[in-house]
Image: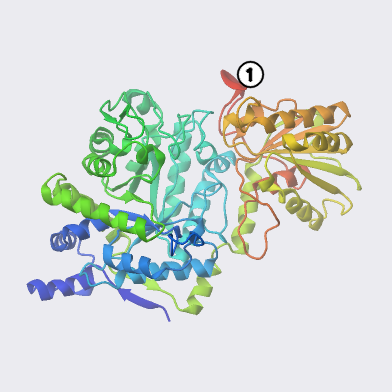
């Protein structure tokens, strides 16, 4: 039977009875603000700071001083991490794909994390927020879970209810695992084709469309009781720099943000969003205060994450947000490379950040000690008055209220083996995967189809070259071929010849293109630089040009399958047909067993061969490209 671990207010109240003679019945754990205030008043500074930390347990190196030792994914807890969870009173833990390889393993790990957190001498026994970035599409963490479609693909279906359906299914799979918080949906408006990090993670380049689909996504998660964190406030869509690796600047005024980027966030706040994630982006037209970068020595502007103007004055004050503000990961280059850790910490609290996401990367005993030393420094700043304790108290209240609203001050389930097996069966189920395929088919978009090339006419014995721009997707065509054969839509004698386009095998690819009956080019474009042969990483685009040219010289047709950013459709205009599928994840070999996989590319290829008619519509404008740069002229209009 399922064991119940009674925690939080109930156990804390029992401790209070000993400490103060005051008793709270377990059934009164939902007693509202009074319970929260009592809890905060009894917590030490250390316990308060702990609640403001969401750490990760991504990798662990048991013996970093041994050159033969290495970081390995954390799939069960090492003793030192168990001790840290017991001692440090973290508010939450974020899991990554490395932690979620297999369903039963993941469920056991989460049970272990929550159990270790409760096995403490502290009177503060509060369950953890267990979070993951399970957006769908190219950002999904559950290794055996259904990957689902990403935001842009949802919008391509033309049906906002798709977003609600997908989010509800995502929430169901997360809940089965024991994950109670989803860092989704992305509410960034992707109004910059050069954006290297948002792209298909956005619903659209139209703020009202992002709002419509984003609110449906929120509704879907809410149905499952999953905490949603809308991101990345106040908007990450109109930048050309990835904050994971650089420090973006967006020189827009508040008035300009109000006309675009802030529209979806306002809608989400008005709809009752419980958590907002910040963006590590500089907005000098809104907050022009500067800090001397610890790396370059140059003056940088306060990013949204560290800006009281943006988080307190705008989000809290003008927009009226009452929930939890969580930072984007503080280990990202935009923060780590520019701000001293202690300065950043004080600035973030003053700005209004409530929950610090990965302030220190933990991967071994030394980095775990560094995290604890950072927490001690935070406590020291509170005790010295450098950090206002009332701001800390305010953060803890908001975190506890959020947990209270989701039953995380009362109990958390732990599973026996039968329950683990039952829960695991809900994650990546055949029913969900079949639904995923049906929804994906509604999103695939045909932009161009000269001479009605699609669906391809096949009699038997033909050979089709499937040319990839990355070897990581090598098995996707075979996945599609096997499905088409099984469905009776393709003779077994048809051959799919997969080749990876690269400068090293240019001649092999062009020769194969000339000899094939038709060519399918699968373009995987994650940034615009990869479309420019003169840029690092762009050489493969020139090989694709040669493949198209060789096929045409031999009188053969070429179909382009755009499987990530749809903007590459502007780059390969010589293709005879262009199909968009808005997402892909590697499929180096055919998936085995219950391993999850992305089926965007196979779905598009199956459509090319007539499994279904293309019905998707373009969610964004695609600008014309000249000299490998986008212009202001629109080549394909949104809605086509």
Give how far across and how far down residue 478 sits, in percent: 76, 52
Left or right, residue 443 beside residue 171:
right
Give how far across and how far down residue 442 sits, in percent: 64, 44
The quarter of the picture where the N terminus appears is bottom left
Q: Residues within 10 Å of mark 1 (few under 14, many from 20)?
A: few
Give how far across and how far down residue 106 sits, in percent: 49, 66
546 and 140: which is toward the camera = 546
Considering every residue shown, the one lying at the far bottom of the view is: 1
Give how far across and how far down residue 199 sits, in percent: 53, 36
- Which residue is rendered at x = 33% and y = 42% of the image? 269
Check the image and tell me how it is coloured.
Answer: rainbow
- Which residue is rendered at x = 41% and y = 78% of the image? 2
Left or right, residue 232 beside residue 608:
left
Is residue 584 visible in this depiction of the protein?
Answer: yes
Would you place residue 578 above or below residue 408 in this image? Answer: above
Judging by the rendered image, the residue that carries numbered circle 1 is: 627
Would you place residue 286 above or below residue 144 in this image? Answer: above
Considering every residue shown, the one lying at the far left of the view is: 21
């Amino acid at each position: 039977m399922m064991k119940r671990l009674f925690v939080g207010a109930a156990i804390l109240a029992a401790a209070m009875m000993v400490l103060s003679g005051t008793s709270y019945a377990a059934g009164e754990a939902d007693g509202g603000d009074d319970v929260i205030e009592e809890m905060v008043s009894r917590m030490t500074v250390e316990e308060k700071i702990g609640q403001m930390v969401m750490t990760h347990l991504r990798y662990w190196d048991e013996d970093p001083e041994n050159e033969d030792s290495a970081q390995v994914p954390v799939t069960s807890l090492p003793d030192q991490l168990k001790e840290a969870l017991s001692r440090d009173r973290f508010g939450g833990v974020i899991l990554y794909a490395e932690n979620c390889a297999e369903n039963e393993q993941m469920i056991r790990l989460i049970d272990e994390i929550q159990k270790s957190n409760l096995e403490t001498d502290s009177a503060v026994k509060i369950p953890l927020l267990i979070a993951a970035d399970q957006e769908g599409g190219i950002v999904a963490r559950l290794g055996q879970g259904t990957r689902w479609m990403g935001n842009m693909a949802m919008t391509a279906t033309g049906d906002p209810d798709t977003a609600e359906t997908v989010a509800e299914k995502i929430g169901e799979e997360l809940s089965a695992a024991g994950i109670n918080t989803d860092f989704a949906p992305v509410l960034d408006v992707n109004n910059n084709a050069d954006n290297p990090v948002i792209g298909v993670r956005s619903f659209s380049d139209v703020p009202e469309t992002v709002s419509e689909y984003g609110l449906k996504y929120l509704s879907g998660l809410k149905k499952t009781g999953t905490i949603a964190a809308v991101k990345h406030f106040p908007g990450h869509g109109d930048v050309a720099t990835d904050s994971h690796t650089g420090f973006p600047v967006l020189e827009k005024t508040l008035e300009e943000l109000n006309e675009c980027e802030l529209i979806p966030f306002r809608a989400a706040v008005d709809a009752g969003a419980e958590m907002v994630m910040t963006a590590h982006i500089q907005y000098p037209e809104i907050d022009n205060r500067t800090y001397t970068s610890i790396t370059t020595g140059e003056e940088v502007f306060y990013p949204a994450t560290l800006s009281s103007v943006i988080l307190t004055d705008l989000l809290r004050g003008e927009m009226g947000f009452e929930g939890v503000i969580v930072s984007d990961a503080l280990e990202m280059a935009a923060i780590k490379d520019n701000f001293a850790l202690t300065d950043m910490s004080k600035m973030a609290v003053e700005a209004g950040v409530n929950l610090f996401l990965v302030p220190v990367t933990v991967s071994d005993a030394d980095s775990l000690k560094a995290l604890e030393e950072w927490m001690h420094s935070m406590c020291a700043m509170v005790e010295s008055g450098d950090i206002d304790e009332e701001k800390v108290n305010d953060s803890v209240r908001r975190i506890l209220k959020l947990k209270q609203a989701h039953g995380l001050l009362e109990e958390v389930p732990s599973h026996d083996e039968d329950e683990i097996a039952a829960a695991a069966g809900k994650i990546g189920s055949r029913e969900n995967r079949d639904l995923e395929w049906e929804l994906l088919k509604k999103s695939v978009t045909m932009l161009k189809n000269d001479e009605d090339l699609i669906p391809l006419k096949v009699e038997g014995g033909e050979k089709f070259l499937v040319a990839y721009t990355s070897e990581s997707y090598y098995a996707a065509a075979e996945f599609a071929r096997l499905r088409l054969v099984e469905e009776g839509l393709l003779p077994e004698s048809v051959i799919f010849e997969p080749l990876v386009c690269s400068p090293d095998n240019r001649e092999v690819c062009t020769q194969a293109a000339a000899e094939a009956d038709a060519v399918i080019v699968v373009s995987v474009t994650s940034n615009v630089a990869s479309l420019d042969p003169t840029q690092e990483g762009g050489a493969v685009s020139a090989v694709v040009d040669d493949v198209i040219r060789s096929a045409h010289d031999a009188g053969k047709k070429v179909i382009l399958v755009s499987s990530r950013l749809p903007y590459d459709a502007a780059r390969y205009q010589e293709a005879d047909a262009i199909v968009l599928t808005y997402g892909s994840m590697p499929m180096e070999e055919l998936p085995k067993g219950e391993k999850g996989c992305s089926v965007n590319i196979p779905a598009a290829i199956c459509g090319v061969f007539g499994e279904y008619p293309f019905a998707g519509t373009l969610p964004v404008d695609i600008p014309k490209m000249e000299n490998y740069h986008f212009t202001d002229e629109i080549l394909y209009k949104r809605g086509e």
